Image (tube, helix red, strand yellow):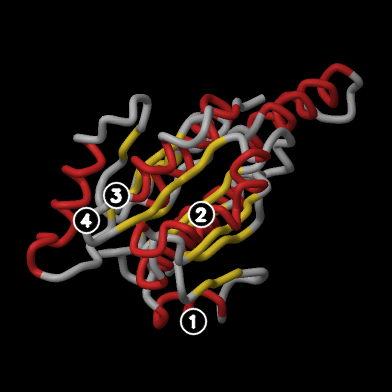
Amino acid sequence: MNKDNIKDILEKISTGKLSVKEALEKLGDFPSALMDFAHIDTHRLLRRGIPETIFGEGKTPEQIEQIVERMLSAESPVLITRISPAVAESLAGRIPDVDYDPVSSTVIVGRLPSAGGRSILVMAAGTSDLPVSEEACRTAAFLGRDVARAYDVGVAGIHRLASYSDEMAESGVIIAVAGMEGALPGVITGLVSKPVIGVPTSVGYGASFSGITPLLTMLSSCACGLTVVNIDNGYGAAVAAHLILGVN
């Protein structure tokens, strides 16, 4: 349920095209929908401009299917993260228009309208960072943002950043994804005059401690203004970028 849905219901009531009883039925899940295993926040899209997202890990195919159906009945688009191929395949066989991406392990059913404004640029240090980078890209696109990509531009070949100077200049927010030592976000922050969000990944050898090392590198950066999200959290970075650019 979003502002346009509420406006449409109110206008139809005022013109007699919709009875109060019918309006109440449409608003039946407002502001939330209680199920045996989930309590869906159907009010979130209206309140924050971002619908509730389904975290796929730990949920059964049946649970995910029922949550998706309830959200769609409330006229909310759906984003699922961390979904397995088997569950995504099961969902696609039961619900139409399922858009599954195996790289990012995400499923999208419907999208928010274009948010306009400047694009979000997602930059990844290495090819191994693509699952997290694509989670960020898919989330941003789901939220109605234009997305640009610049992949395999880590500090081991720092000259590669120069190839994307135009994209960095034109973007509104940059999401920089890196594992190993996690130096890329700090470097980018020192080059641009716009928000940069660092995403540490769990990619790397033993001394990277499954993402702890890049996380601490980013948090310790002397490039002021760098914002950092949790390890492998491409979703959180994209939502933050979306909010920075402004939600109507």
Q: Residue at x 39, y 67 (%)?
A: 126
Observer able to see residue 51: yes
Q: Earlier in the sequence, mark 2 or mark 4?
A: 2
User: Which circle marks residue 127 in the picture?
Assistant: none
Q: Identify the residue under disc 1.
A: 89
Outermost residue toward the front in this view: 159
Mark 3 and mark 4 in contact (Cβ < 8 Å)?
yes
Q: Amino acid at mark 2?
A: Leu
Residue drawn where x is 50% and y is 61% of the image: 160
Tell me how far mark 2 sits from mark 4, CA to CA.
Answer: 17 Å
Q: Which residue is mark 3?
A: 183
Task: Report x, y in % for residue 83.
Answer: 39, 68
Q: Which residue is labeled 4 in the image? A: 181
Q: CA distance from mark 1 to mark 3?
A: 37 Å
x and y percent of residue 177 in the render?
38, 54
Q: Secondary structure at mark 1?
A: helix
Q: Is residue 125 above or below residue 36?
A: below
**Which disc, if any, is residue 161?**
2
Where's the N terminus, which quadrant?
top right
Can you tell which of label 2 and label 4 is closer to the viewer?
2
Q: Position of residue 239 (x, y in %)?
A: 47, 40
Asked whether 181 or 55 is in front, the reply is 181
SS at badge 4: loop
Disc 3 marks a residue whose amino acid type is: Ala
Name the amino acid type tagged 1.
Glu
